[in-house]
């Protein structure tokens, strides 16, 4: 009798274990799904941050144009990325699923997260080309960047392509997202030419102040906040314990970038410039995006601090040496620091952090890992630079020769809001007279 009772309880216990394991697996899947979608929402909210930063750093007469570009790059990009981009990157399409097993539903969440990234790459281009680009031209090239240029780089690195096979590491997109956007922005701004009045007769740059620094500051804080989803969400798993470390590294790099940018500009020009300090925080965020899951918190501070210094000198270089007019510093923040952050992976990776994130047992050059990974990272940076520059040039050149890339002089001087959109961002500030 005792044996029968024991056997019965053993069977019930094993059944309960199986049931509990099944429920546990379901809960893990649900947590992962919720975390991905929450992170996608945070990254989507970064569109508002970019809109506020770009609006604040440019003139009031172009505010509606800035808002429309940020609204439409995500709208156009969503459709194009759904039709083409995701398939190019991953070789599949989130269209079908098995209702009995629910197999395939995961792809819908991953698509949404990846789309938010694609939209960010396109938005970066907007800032460097602000205040003189035709809206119709913008609609065309933002779709091309999202659906093709970005998607091909994503295939190389995140879709199992040739760089991934060589061991290239870009955890959350310093190169895939930010360098692609930054290099495309550089080509677009160069082909556009500077804004009227930007350079004097001897080629010296004149400052064109933004109209609303508090708005730009709000945008910076929104971006900083959204970046926790940008980097933390790249685990694609809410049950990954490394999320806390990744978000900590993200925050430390941003803080270090803001401090070093402020100190650098203060020493060089005698004032702690607010706009450059904001760009320093963003530079730190961009730089740590690639290595955030594989480096220590101390290394994150170093990576962000160097990013803050780099952005100050890069802005000067593009403005004074190359004569490329970038109203918001997008090329310096995203292109230069995207490259720096990617290279930093090959220098600062530590095995225990990489293993904790599921990346693998690997060390960077400063921690006894040799130069192999550093060489791979440099190869990836160079390859993406060449690809983006060539394809962006072809797209912008084609637009310039067909529908035109730049508005006419009168429209630019009047402001794009009136001629391009038929309204103003601050219409209530006008004085009307009645008779």
Image (cartoon, rainbow, N blue to C red):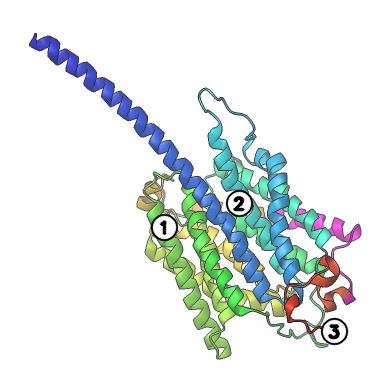
To which quarter of the image does residue 198 belong? Answer: bottom right
Q: Residues within 10 Å of mark 2 (few under 14, many from 20)?
A: many
Residue reaching furthest right?
Answer: 402
Question: What's the CA distance linking mark 1 and mark 2?
Answer: 25 Å
Q: Quickly name the residue at label 1.
A: 295
**Going 17% across and 13% down the picture, which residue do you hit?**
7
Left or right relative to 227: residue 73: right
Q: Is residue 111 above or below residue 184?
A: above
Please check the rendered image and state whether residue 397 is part of the magenta-colored stretch, yes or no: yes
Of all residues shown, which one is farthest toward the bottom?
270
| SS label for mark 2 | helix
CA distance for labels 2 and 3 = 48 Å
Q: Are marks 2 and 3 in contact (CB under 8 Å)?
A: no
Label ID, residue 116 = 2
Residue that label 3 marks: 434
Q: Is residue 163 visible?
A: no
Quick one: label 2 or label 3, which is nearer the N terminus? 2
Boundaries of the magenta span: 388-410
Vertical order, 286 against 12 (above or below) = below
Residue 352 is situated, as x and y percent measured from the top left of the image, at 35, 51
């Amino acid at each position: 009798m005792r044996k029968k009772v024991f056997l019965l309880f053993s069977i019930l216990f094993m059944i309960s274990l199986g049931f509990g394991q099944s429920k546990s697996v379901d809960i893990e899947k649900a947590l992962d799904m919720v975390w991905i979608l929450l992170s996608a929402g945070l990254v989507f909210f970064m569109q508002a941050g970019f809109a506020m930063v770009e609006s604040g750093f440019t003139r009031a007469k172009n505010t509606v144009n800035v808002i429309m570009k940020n609204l439409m790059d995500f709208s156009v990009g969503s459709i194009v990325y759904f039709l083409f981009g995701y398939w190019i990157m991953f070789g599949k399409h989130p269209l079908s699923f098995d209702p009995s097993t629910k197999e395939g539903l995961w792809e819908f969440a991953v698509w949404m997260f990846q789309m938010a990234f694609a939209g960010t790459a396109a938005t970066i281009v907007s800032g460097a080309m602000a205040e003189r680009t035709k809206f119709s031209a913008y609609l065309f090239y933002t779709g091309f960047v999202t659906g093709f240029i970005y998607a091909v780089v994503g295939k190389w690195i995140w879709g199992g392509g040739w760089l991934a096979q060589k061991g290239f590491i870009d955890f959350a997109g310093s190169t895939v997202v930010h360098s692609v956007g930054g290099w495309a922005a550089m080509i677009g701004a160069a082909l556009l030419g500077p804004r009227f009045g930007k350079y004097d007769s001897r080629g010296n740059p004149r400052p064109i102040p933004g109209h609303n620094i508090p708005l730009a500051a709000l945008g910076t804080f929104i971006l900083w906040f959204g970046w926790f989803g940008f980097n933390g969400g790249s685990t694609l798993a809410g049950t990954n314990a490394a999320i806390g470390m990744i978000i900590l590294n993200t925050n430390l790099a941003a803080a270090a970038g803001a401090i070093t940018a402020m100190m650098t500009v203060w020493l060089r020009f005698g004032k702690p410039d607010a706009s450059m300090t904001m760009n320093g925080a963003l530079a730190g965020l961009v730089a740590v995006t690639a290595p955030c899951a594989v480096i220590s918190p101390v290394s994150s501070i170093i990576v962000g601090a160097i990013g803050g210094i780099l952005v100050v000198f890069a802005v000067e270089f593009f403005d004074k040496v190359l004569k490329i007019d970038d109203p918001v510093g997008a090329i310096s923040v995203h292109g230069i620091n995207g490259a720096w952050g990617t290279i930093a992976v090959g220098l600062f990776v530590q095995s225990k952090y990489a293993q904790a994130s599921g990346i693998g047992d690997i060390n960077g050059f400063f921690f006894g890992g040799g130069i192999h990974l550093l060489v791979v990272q440099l190869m990836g940076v160079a390859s993406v630079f060449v690809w983006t520059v060539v394809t962006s040039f072809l797209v912008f050149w084609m637009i310039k020769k067909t529908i035109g890339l730049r508005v006419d002089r009168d429209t630019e001087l009047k402001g794009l809001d009136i001629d391009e959109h038929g309204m103003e961002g601050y219409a209530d500030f006008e004085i009307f007279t009645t008779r």
